[in-house]
Amino acid sequence: MSSPDVGELEEHAVLAAMRSGWIAPLGPDVDAFETEIADRVGVSHGIALSSGTAALHLALLTLGATRGDVVVTSTMTFAATTNAIMYTGAEPHFVDCLPHTGNMDPELLRRALVRLQEQGRRVAAVVPVDLLGKAVDYTQILSIAQEFNVPVLSDAAESLGAKHRGKPVGSFGAASVFSFNGNKIMTTSGGGMLMTDDEEFANHVRYLATQARQPVIHYEHLDVGYNYRMSNLLAALGRAQLERLDEMIAKRRKLRDEYKNLFASMPGIRVFGSEHDDEDNVWLTAISINESVTGFGPKDLALALARNNIESRPIWKPMHLQPVFSQYEGEISGVAEQLFKTHLTLPSGSALSQRQREFVYDKISEFIGAQK
Ligand SMILES: *Cc1c(COP(=O)(O)O)cnc(C)c1O
C-alpha cells in the first residue's frame, strides 16, 4: 500500500556513512539530517530519534505530562499517538473529527477543554494529528488551545511536506513530530524527528533521548532516561530520501489524480478529501464507498483486491473503539466511526510502477463492472 521507495541514491548514502566509520546513534549525518529537515519546515531545532512514537513520548514528557493529567487527542489516528500518551501515565481524552479531512473537529476540541476545565483536570497538551497527510486546521486549533492556555503538540507523523495556509507542517505549536517508518512518505527504515523553535525544549528532548546523562565525565543521572537516538546510518538514508521528497510527493499526487479519473465515472465512490487536497503531501489515497449506491462496501472491494494480491485497508479504526482505550472519555460525534466503516485506503506508494498502477486500476474496474 505504501512501500519504501529507495534506490541507488540511498544505497550510496548508506554505504558512504558506513565507510565513514560513524556507525553509532550520533555522527555527521544525524547532525546534517536534523538541520536539513529543520530548514525545510522552517524551525530552529530538529532532534532525530528512533521512531515517531519515541518523539511523541519525549515531547509529552517535556511538556510535563504525567499521572493525573489529561492529554486531548484525535480519536481518528494510529494507535502510536495514544500509546505515547499512555507511556507518560496521563489519560487520553478523544476528540472526533471533521468528515472531509478526518482531522480534529475544532468545536469538539473546545467542548473537551470546557468540560475538562469544569472538572478541574490539568490538560498537559492537545495532540492533533494530520490524517493521511492532510494538515489540521492549525489556525483554529492553536487559537482554541491558546484560549485555555494548553500547549499543542502536532502529530505530523503522516504529513511531512504538507502545508496549512502556505506554512509547512512541523512548524505549528510548541513542538511537532515526524515519522520515518518504512511506510511513511519518506523513510529511514525506522525513525522519527521532534521539531521545535524552543531551544530549552530541544535540549530537554536530547537529554532524555540519551539516557538523561548529566554533563560530567563520570556517569551521573538525576532523571530516568531513554535510548531513543537515531543511528547515523539511518540518518544518511533519510538525507538521501529528503533529496527525493518532492519527487515522491509528485508521484503520489499523480497516482491520486489517476484514481480521481478512474472513480469519476463510478457513482457512489469518491476520493477522500478531494476538495481540500492542494496542500497535503498525498501520503495515502482513500476512497469513500456509498454502499446504498454501489451495492457493495469497502470490505467487498478489499477482498476482491486481496485475491489479486493488492493490499488495501480501512482507514484507522478510531481510538475510542479500541478495546484497550475504550474506558477513556471523549467528545464523540460518530464521524470517525462513519469514516472507518465507509472508507478504504488504496495502494498509494511512490515506488509503484506504471504497470503495477494499471494492474490495480484494471482489477478495481473489473470488480466494479462485475457488480452491475
Ligand atoms: C506512523 C505514525 C506514528 C508513529 O510513528 P513511528 O515512527 O512508526 O513510531 C505516530 N502517529 C501517527 C499518526 C502515525 O501515522
Image: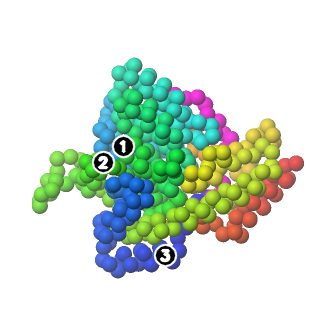
Residue on which the image places disc 1: 174
Which one is earlier in the sequence, the residue at label 1 or at label 3? 3
Residue 71, quarter of picture: top left
Colour scheme in use: rainbow
Q: Residues within 10 Å of mark 3 (few under 14, many from 20)?
A: some
14 relative to 337 in the view: left or right: left
> Is 110 or 168 nearer to us in this picture?
168
Q: Residues within 10 Å of mark 1 (few under 14, many from 20)?
A: many
Task: Say which mark, if any, is on residue 64.
Answer: none
Q: Residue 135 placed where, x, y %?
A: 52, 46
Q: Secondary structure at mark 3?
A: helix
> Is 24 or 31 nearer to us in this picture?
31
Q: CA distance from mark 2 to mark 1?
A: 8 Å
Dot in front, 1 or 3 = 1
Residue on which the image places disc 3: 9
36 relative to 347 in the view: left or right: left
Whether residue 145 is in magenta: the answer is no
Q: Residue at x 49, y 55 (%)?
A: 160
Q: For the view shown, which residue lies furthest in the top direction?
A: 118
Q: For the view shown, which residue lies furthest in the right direction?
A: 372
Which one is earlier in the sequence, the residue at label 2 or at label 1? 1
Q: For the view shown, which residue lies furthest in the bottom direction?
A: 19
Q: Secondary structure at mark 1?
A: loop
Q: Residue 185 placed where, x, y %?
A: 53, 59
Task: Say whether residue 257 is visible.
Answer: yes
Q: Residue at x 48, y 63 (%)?
A: 187
Q: Which residues are magenta?
A: 329-348
Which one is earlier in the sequence, the residue at label 3 or at label 2? 3
> Is 220 or 288 nearer to us in this picture?
288
Whether residue 338 is in magenta: the answer is yes
Q: Are marks 2 and 1 in contact (CB under 8 Å)?
A: yes
Task: Say which mark, if any, is on residue 198.
Answer: 2
